[in-house]
Image (cartoon, helix red, strand yellow):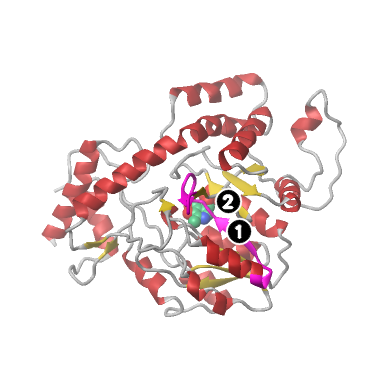
Amino acid sequence: MSSDEPFLPFARPTISEEAIAEVADCLRSGWITTGPRTAAFEMDMKTYFDAPHALAFSSATAGLYVALKAIGLQPGDEVITTAMTFAATLNVIVLAGGIPIMVDVDPRNYNICVEDIESKITPRTKAIMPVHFAGFPVDLDPIYALAKQHNLRVIEDSAHAIGNHYKGRKLGSFGDIQVFSFHPNKNMTTGEGGGLVTRDDDVANAAERQRFHGMDRMAWNRFSKAGSQHYEIVEPAHKFNMMDIQSALGLHQLRAVDGFNEKRTQLAGQYFEALKDFEPLLLPQFPTKYDFTHAWHLFSPRVNEKVTSLSRDEVMQALKEENIGTGLHYRAPHLYPYYRKTFGYKPGDCPKAEAVGESIFSLPLFPTLTQNEFDRVICALKKVFKNA
Ligand SMILES: Cc1ncc(COP(=O)(O)O)c(C=O)c1O
């Protein structure tokens, strides 16, 4: 029998009245595309990340693609990445002309096995693209050491990872290039959007051109009193800019994100406590040698096939019937038909990621999740596995 309570989504953005008013002000202002609010949002990102360059994009996918173009990826270059991520991580490598080289993951926390990276480096390797899965920082020091040794770039897919720390330093405040996502189910949102952070002037300049038609000057400068009507096209490029309507939201979300993360961390703690002896689920584990804070973008357990005959898909379906939404993050992306057909990937290439991809799912986690909603999730989980 299904729950009488309303459907509980697995993610829900938290948007203040001040942010809504700022969006309305922007709409009334006469300037709704990239302009002063995006410039202010980028300034705030620079301060937040303590970085010399922060560029707003229409999505993290666009930011990652542009990062690969900005480091000069050439057709046939290889980019080493993780076998447990959203398809965007692989897609952008291919769209930028590269070949994604997959590395298996730690099945306890779904991050790339750093010790397996070196064996994948070849003369064609151009970059390493780790993903901080769910907001748990990858062990970056050995990755940057490898990159230095082999003259590689590092593009951190930080889509899940705004506001977390590795060895006491905020992600984005050090390293090569980081790209954050502001999609509505992420820790902060601009509707759709992404932010690229770098300390490299050449990458920042190339990324700026690649973001907007290959122009040497942004449109809003051209139309302002101080600007010139002229521009040059120095290379053909896409149109991946963020609108001021989005940045109006971003200005407020960025100020709030550390508070959102505190609430997410508290809720993750509640999940660990409520499910610590619950055998049908394997909870994430972090047996690391380094200090970190976790952004808790996702709380993603695995179905423990040793104690239940229910498949992950059956668990998600049964929870849906209890009016509890869940997310599927992720099936192992190298097994999607395109990647099998084009690069010859097959089952068994990354067995740990494949096992994770068959058993993982994400429970509701967002800052405004109430105690009643949290209790409903736990009750529904217990009911689903008891009924099985
Ligand atoms: C790991 C990862 N990388 C990249 C992306 C792409 O982000 P966006 O939706 O902002 O393009 C996502 C989105 O979910 C993601 O989870």
For image coordinates 33% across by 35% down, the residue present is 368
Label 2: which secondary element: strand
Would residue 152 be counted in the magenta stretch? yes
Residue tagged by mark 1?
155
Q: Nearer the viewer, residue 249 or 24?
A: 249
Residue 2 appears in the picture as rendered:
yes
For image coordinates 34% across by 65% down, the residue present is 108
| Numbered circle sitting on residue 125 | none
The location of residue 199, given as percent across then percent down, is 67, 50
Cβ atoms at labels 1 and 2 below 8 Å apart: yes
Question: Is 127 on the left or on the right of 369, as rendered?
Answer: right
The location of residue 339, given as percent across then percent down, is 53, 72
Q: Label 2 is placed on what type of residue?
A: Val
Q: Start and end of the magenta stretch?
A: 149-168
What is the quadrant of the C terminus in the image?
bottom left
Residue ranking furthest to the left: 386
The location of residue 356, given as percent across then percent down, is 36, 67
Q: Label 1 is placed on what type of residue?
A: Ile
Label 1: which secondary element: strand
Residue tagged by mark 2?
179
Vertical arrangement, residue 9 with respect to residue 166, above or below: above
Sequence order check, earlier mark of 1 and 2? 1
The location of residue 275, given as percent across then percent down, is 21, 54
For image coordinates 43% across by 53% down, the residue present is 292
Disc 2: residue Cβ within 8 A of ligand 1's nearest atom: yes
Would residue 117 be counted in the magenta stretch? no
